[in-house]
Image (cartoon, rainbow, N blue to C red):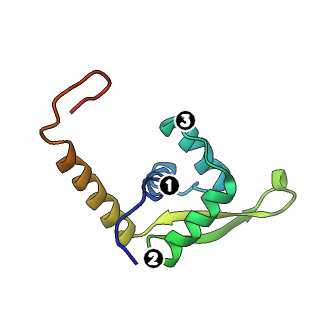
Amino acid sequence: MSDHLTDLEQMLLLAVVRLKGDAWGAAIQEELEARAERRVSLGSIHVTLGRLEERGLVVSKKGDPTGERGGKARRLYAVTETGRVALDRGRRIMKRLWEGVSPEPGLEP
């Protein structure tokens, strides 16, 4: 399996990092809508998180049951050190790709 991240994988990892311990499906979905202006279904989020967990980029645990969810516990996600390394690698790749791109309407170097 490739160690490259898709754009959705990278966005999910970044959302999990930003949510600092309170990263669960709906919160991640809201973060993506607010910050990335991208609507992603909960199903896609859960499938992608499962794939990231299989690759060792995130870990999950069940949180405490909540009354607002009928007593059902949320699955909380955290980025592993391997996930942070993958995010950093993706950032460095994108930075190198943007180097030398001259500004055009709608593009910033």
Which residue is found at the position 26% from the left and 49% from the top? Answer: 94
The furthest residue to the left:
100
Q: Residues within 10 Å of mark 2 (few under 14, many from 20)?
A: some
Task: Name the kind of residue labelled 1 in the image.
Answer: Leu
- Marks 3 and 1 sit apart, C-alpha to C-alpha, by 13 Å
Q: Is residue 107 left or right of residue 45?
A: left
Q: Earlier in the sequence, mark 3 or mark 1?
A: 1
Q: Residues within 10 Å of mark 3 (few under 14, many from 20)?
A: few
Which residue position is annotated with label 1?
A: 12
Q: Earlier in the sequence, mark 1 or mark 2?
A: 1
Q: Residues within 10 Å of mark 1 (few under 14, many from 20)?
A: many
Callout 1 touching callout 2 (CB < 8 Å): no
- Marks 1 and 2 sit apart, C-alpha to C-alpha, by 14 Å
Name the disc covering residue 56, or none. Answer: 2
Instruction: Label 1: state its secondary structure.
Output: helix
Q: Against 100, is 68 above or below?
A: below
Which residue position is annotated with label 3?
A: 34
Residue 48, quarter of the rendered image: bottom right
Q: Nearer the viewer, residue 105 or 21?
A: 105
Q: Whole-percent x and y of residue 26? A: 67, 50
